[in-house]
């Protein structure tokens, strides 16, 4: 059951603007509502010290009262800051269209919050990195990794700058998640009129050739005259090379490497692609 709703996550980082532009593109093509979430972390409790032996009781009481007032002022400022982030995001999404936008300010753990609300949306959009992006460019945002692991919906991962999407590269391995991606593309208005290329990275076998042909036929039935590419090499290296040539503005791929044993990490191919890819990535589960 679909909700015709896109969940967009913003935190005020440099990637939030890109999240908004991509959210507007996705929602506009699907005629979806956008729910923008800004989730504030749990506030650390004010550290309470036993000051009774150091200063007079009256002074101690006055100090604790001041600390409490300061804590309340910080909380109020954090909420005002969160509201400002949401209003700026809403304005960006609606700048060139009449997309329906709702805003949600929440406090707590981001992944717990989104997991509880995931059923109200059909897709999640998040930036590749968050507020600490400038400090750790080689690392993925920790919240991104957790959301990709936890989400049952497609997760659209925005890179730093928005670029109009005209051509889509689909990482295909014949597995369940890549077959689901092909079916999704064939049916979704999000991909209407876009150029689609299927790529398999690995050993050429008759079984793989048949899988590629079947996938291309599925796309053909959906109105796409898809190209197919079969190239030897490690998937993450092949995909990184192809996406770096500027011919494709979006990579669609399954969440590789999931198993019961490795349920707490993202598959190595997925992780490497998210880290190195210069275009947005749509992860299918």
Image: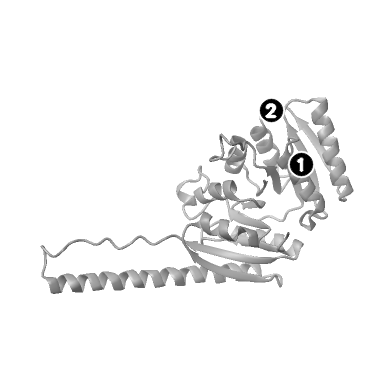
Instruction: State the residue at coordinates (62%, 68%).
Output: 92
Q: CA distance from mark 1 to mark 2?
A: 21 Å
Q: Circle 1: is it few (<14), some (14-19), or many (20+) Cα within 10 Å? A: many
Q: Quadrant of residue 259?
A: top right
The label number, if any, that marks residue 233 in the structure image: 2
Say if mark 1 contacts mark 2, CB within 8 Å: no
In depth, the one of 137 and 115 nearer the eye is 115
Q: Quadrant of residue 115?
A: bottom right
Q: Is residue 120 left or right of residue 51?
A: right
Q: Is residue 45 left or right of residue 59?
A: right
Q: Position of residue 38 (x, y in %)?
A: 53, 64
Using the image, determine if residue 99 lies above or below residue 202: below
Q: Which residue is mark 1?
A: 179
Q: Nearer the viewer, mark 1 or mark 2?
A: 1
The label number, if any, that marks residue 29 in the structure image: none
Q: Could you tell me if residue 14 is visible in this image? A: yes
Q: Secondary structure at mark 2?
A: loop
Q: Position of residue 75 (x, y in %)?
A: 39, 69
In depth, the one of 203 and 169 nearer the eye is 203
Q: Position of residue 254 (x, y in %)?
A: 68, 42
Image quarter (top left, top right, bottom left or bottom right) of the N terminus:
bottom right
Instruction: State the residue at coordinates (47%, 46%).
Output: 136
Q: Position of residue 62 (x, y in %)?
A: 19, 74
In depth, the one of 262 and 38 nearer the eye is 262
Q: Circle 2: is it few (<14), some (14-19), or many (20+) Cα within 10 Å? A: few
Q: Earlier in the sequence, mark 1 or mark 2?
A: 1
Q: Is residue 125 left or right of residue 51?
A: right
Q: Could you tell me if residue 225 is visible in this image? A: no
Colour scheme employed for the rendering of this structure: one colour
Instruction: State the residue at coordinates (66%, 29%).
Output: 234
Instruction: State the residue at coordinates (61%, 58%).
Output: 118
Q: Secondary structure at mark 1?
A: helix
């Amino acid at each position: 059951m679909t909700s015709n709703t896109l969940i967009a996550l913003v935190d005020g980082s440099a990637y939030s603007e890109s999240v908004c532009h991509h959210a507007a593109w996705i929602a506009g093509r699907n005629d979806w509502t956008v729910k923008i979430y800004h989730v504030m972390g749990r506030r650390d409790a004010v550290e309470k010290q036993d000051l009774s032996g150091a200063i007079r009781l009256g002074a101690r009481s006055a100090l604790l009262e001041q600390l409490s007032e300061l804590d309340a002022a910080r909380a109020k400022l954090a909420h005002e800051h969160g509201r400002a982030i949401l209003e700026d995001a809403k304005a960006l999404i609606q700048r060139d269209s009449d997309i329906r936008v709702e805003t949600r300010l929440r406090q707590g753990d981001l992944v717990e919050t989104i997991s509880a609300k995931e059923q109200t949306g059909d897709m999640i959009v998040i930036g590749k990195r968050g507020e600490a992006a400038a400090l750790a460019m080689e690392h993925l945002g920790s919240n991104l990794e957790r959301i990709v692991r936890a989400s049952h919906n497609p997760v659209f991962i925005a890179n730093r700058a928005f670029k109009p999407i005209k051509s889509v590269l689909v990482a295909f391995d014949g597995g369940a998640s890549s077959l689901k991606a092909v079916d999704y593309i064939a049916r979704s208005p999000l991909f209407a009129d876009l150029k689609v290329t299927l790529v398999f990275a690995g050993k050429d076998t008759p079984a793989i050739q048949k899988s590629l042909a079947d996938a291309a036929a599925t796309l053909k039935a959906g109105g796409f005259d898809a190209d197919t590419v079969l190239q030897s090499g490690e998937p993450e290296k092949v995909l990184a090379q192809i996406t770096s040539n500027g011919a494709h503005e979006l990579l669609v791929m399954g969440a590789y490497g999931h198993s019961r044993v490795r349920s707490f990490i993202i598959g190595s191919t997925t992780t490497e692609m998210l880290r190195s890819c210069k275009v947005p990535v749509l992860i299918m589960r």
